[in-house]
Image (cartoon, rainbow, N blue to C red):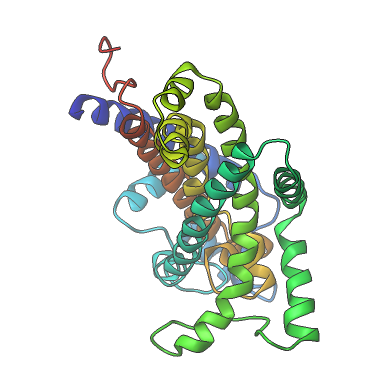
Amino acid sequence: MARYLLKRIGQSLIVLLILSVSVFLLMSLLPGDPVYAMLGDGITPEQYQLTYHELGLDQPVMTRYFSWLFNVLHGNFGTSYQFHLPVAELLKERVPITIYLSTLATLIAMPLGVLFGVICAVNRGKKIDAVITLVANACSCLPQFWIGIFLMYIFAMKLKLLPSYGFTMPWVDFGKHIRQLIMPLICLSIDGIAGITRQTRSSMLESIRQDYVRTAKAKGLKPFAVTYIHTLKNSLIPIVTLFGVRLSYMVGGSIFVENVFSIPGMGSLLVRAITSKDIPLVQACVLLTSVVTVIAYIITDFIYVLVDPRIKLTKGEG
C-alpha cells in the first residue's frame, strides 16, 4: 500500500509539474498587456515601466516561471490584477463555497443515479425502464446553464417561490440558505444522476447474465440479496469511475451554475479572471483544479481495491 501510494504521488507530481509549465506558458502567450490590465490605460510611461519591472515581465519566461513556482510552493500565488488582493486570500473565500456545492451535488447524484439504474436493470424492457432511460438520455444532453435559466424562469420569475441569485451561509439564515441551494443543486446534480443511471443500468445488465447470479437465484436467495449484494457489488467498477469523474469536477465543474445564480464561488471567480485577463488568478484557479483532479483519481484507485479485492495495488500480486 505504501509503495503504491508513493508511486501514485510521484506520478501525480510529474503531471502537476507539466500542467504548471503549460498553464504558465499559455498565460504568458495571451494577447494584451498585464500592466494595463492591472492599472488601466491612464497611467504614465514611468508608472508603466515601474510596474512592468515589479511584475518581473522584463525577465525571461523560464526565469519568471521558476520564480512563480517557488512562490506557489510557499503558498504565494501572487496578487490579483483586478481585485488588488492576494490570490490566496480570494481563493480562501471562494473555494469552500464551490466544494460545498459540488459535494452536496455528488452526494445527491450518486445514490439516486445508482437507484434509478438498478430499477431500470431489474425491470428491463418494461415501461418504467423506458421512461427512466428516456429521461436520463434527455437530461444528459441538457446544458447546465439552460437548466438554470429554465428553473429560474419558472420558480423565481413566474411562481416567485425561490430566490434567483446569491448564496447565504447556513449559520446566517438557514431558511434562506436552503431556498438558495435548491435550483443550483438541481443543475449540478441532474447531469450526474443521468450519467450514473445509464452506467449503472449497463453494468447491472452485464452482471445479471453472469453465472454467479444464476447460482444465487438457484440457491433461493431473496431478490434483494441477488440484486444488491451479488449483482450490484460486481457492477461497481464503472460506477466508481464515474464517481472519480464527479470528484474531479468539484472545483471547476460549477462555473456555469455559479454564474447563472451569481454564487460567489471559484467558478464565477475564474470567469471574471479570464474576462479581465487577471493572469495570476487564472493560473491559481487552473492549478488548483488540476490538484483536485489528481487527488480525485488517486482516491478512485483506492476505492477500486475496496469494491473489488481482485484488483491489487502492487505489481505481481494479481
Pick the residue in front: 258 or 269: 258
Q: Left or right of 27: which side holds 32?
A: right
Residue 201: give x, y in percent of width and height: 61, 37
Q: Residue at x 66, y 48 (%)?
A: 30
Residue drawn at (60%, 60%) of the image? 188
The N terminus lies in quadrant: top left
How far from the left and from the top, in percent, is residue 18?
Answer: 46, 33
Q: Is residue 290 left or right of residue 155?
A: left
Q: Residue at x 61, y 69 (%)?
A: 184
- Residue 300, relative to residue 113: is it above or below? above
Decide if residue 203 is in sight here: yes
Q: Could you say which is closer to the camera, residue 279 or residue 262? A: 262
Q: Residue furthest top?
A: 316
Quadrant placement of the C terminus: top left
Residue 23 in the image: above or below residue 215: below
Q: Residue placed farthest to the left in the image?
A: 2
